[in-house]
Amino acid sequence: MTSSAINAQYTADAQYLLRRVYGYAAFRDHQADIIQHVIAGGDAFVLMPTGGGKSLCYQLPAMLRPGVGIVISPLIALMQDQVTALNALGVKAAMLNSSLTGPQRQTVKAQLRAGALDLLYMAPERLMLEDTLDMLADCPLALFAIDEAHCVSQWGHDFRPEYLQLSALHERFPEVPRIALTATADTPTRREIVERLNLQDARTFVSGFDRPNIRYRIVCKESPRQQLYRFITEEHPGDAGIVYCLSRKKTEEIARWLQGKGLTALPYHAGLDARTREQHQERFLREDGVIIVATIGFGMGIDKPDVRFVAHLDLPKSIEAYYQETGRAGRDGLPADAWMVYGLADVAIHRQLIENSEADALHKRLEHQKLTALLGLCETAACRRQVLLQYFSDALPAPCGNCDTCLTPVETWDGTLVARKALYVIRQTKQLFGVGHLTDILRGTDTEKVRKFRHQQLSAFGNGQELSEREWASVFRQLVATGLLAVDMEQHGSLKLTPESLQILQNARSISLRKDPLPARSTPGASRKKAPRLAQTTAARLGNNRAASDLFELLRVTRRELAALHSVPPYVIFHDKTLLEMAELRPLSREQLRGITGVGERKLEEYGDAFLEVIDRYVRG
């Protein structure tokens, strides 16, 4: 056969499995090309957004090539999630890690030696043990899939030193194709991944980074707890979500506070014992409407598709971290929110963390650059999605229409004069004071502190009455974000001039500032008036058909019951998207149900009759 004929056969075989196993009619973006390339034995480096279907790119080749596909995964929770979902599809998958008992590990090894597995998941530490490598040397291997490949980057946000050992795979198993996959990598990180994994000869596949179903929103930090509560109760009542905080202490405080407000909120951080973390994660995966309040250690690789919001109460440290964390929302393609509160203290804390770290000067400089890029995203008056994608060298030709700056355009104004006033008062007060006192001086407020230091005698006193306290706070925040001011946390948040300040003071530079929108205020009963985004999505998808929406809810109840019966998360049975299509098309036979997206042969056999019964009963009234 010619190479083109062989490739056509590969594509046909993959298409058959896509429909029979996964229940999908067609591949997306570069999936077909990646799968064909790896089946043919080629190495690949894949960048694809969360929810874009990366796992299919190695799962299908592992099923179609002789031997077992070895998947390197950084977290036990991620392995468990993937293996559970694959087993539900009828795929022969297992994992080898410390969560297994001795007899369980022996069973998996016996399956491996017998050629009874399509996919075997393990962490890099276990894979690179000499015993493991010797065991694999005696087995036919289909491929090595290096998931979450950004973990190999020492400049990245999730660096795992164990990933550095994986370059040896090419030397030990030169004939086995390797595929490295990530959803998050800027250009320098991509280069590092390729170099550290010896993938210089691999073919690179880059899909767009855009997640159009996610609405990005960044608001000024006023009363963060109340702002969060309003956001959840007014826009996402009953929805599953993740709230990220910077510290372990804060995650527990916010979780308790939300619980006191009647919400199902659970903390998650590395300081909790393993059993508690596991219980909280299990509840998040298996129950509806659970909110996890977590540090950044939570969520990498979690496949829960119906997370309707990700909220940040503290600034992440880079755009890569922000993109990956917000990418855990809306994996099912339905509308979701990425919401963040942001203030001056966030900037100061992150700059201090960078300076106090043990990193070398080069690393610190890079971290400052990454933080500056994130601050640019926070302070932009342009489309946030365009700014976000531009960071990853991915262009969006026109504003997205689904971020706060598109939906409520932000005004900008010439802030040169007020910036000069702000810098001047800092110089007059010898760079010893913070925003509150400086604002009092500018507004001419007669406070005890002003009298104590005789600052009413300064020429700057009362020279900024044209702006409110809130507006001056915005000015100072933006000056810090743009590097025209620095915050000295060791001096109780006093503001310091920077070399760039001189340009403004000498009138050698102008600056444009954004006018922050006024904070939203809730009204009594607001949370009862607004439906959750998923309900709005359902109504839009079903043409505001109340009957179809009722059927959708009945199907969700059936899914929940089946999930409990089989001890799996509800989304392992079927995604919301699949239930929406059932409610819309109302299949009444197995053949009709087979045409629904996400209904593969194993799931049709296992769960089909239960859902058909619900639909039939509903149609008959």
Image (tube, rainbow, N blue to C red):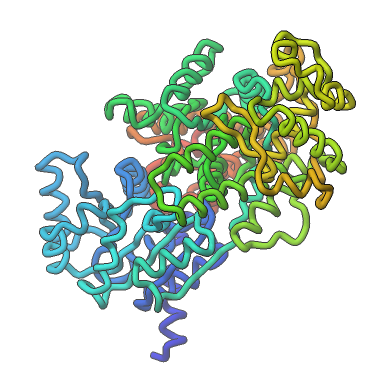
- Answer above or below: position of 97 versus 201: above
Is 167 on the left-hand or right-hand side of 419? left
Q: Quadrant of the N terminus?
A: bottom left
Task: Identify the residue at image location x=44%, y=20%.
Answer: 252
Is 295 on the left-hand or right-hand side of 451? left
Where does residue 452 sit, x and y in percent of width and height?
A: 70, 11
- Answer above or below: position of 492 versus 334: above
Task: Identify the residue at image location x=75%, y=15%.
Answer: 454
Q: Identify which residue, 244 or 14, lies in the foreground.
A: 244
Where does residue 63 sit, x and y in percent of width and height?
A: 33, 64
Is 156 on the left-hand or right-hand side of 93? right
Residue closest to the far top: 448
The image quarter containing residue 272 is: top left
The answer to whether one can see residue 608 in this image is no
Task: Identify the residue at image location x=65%, y=32%.
Answer: 495
Q: Quadrant of the C terminus?
A: top right
The image quarter containing residue 152 is: bottom left
- Answer above or below: position of 349 versus 265: below
Where does residue 353 sit, x and y in percent of width and height?
A: 47, 38
Task: Identify the residue at image location x=49%, y=35%.
Answer: 613
Where does residue 410 sit, x and y in percent of width and height?
A: 82, 40
The answer to whether one can see residue 275 in this image is yes
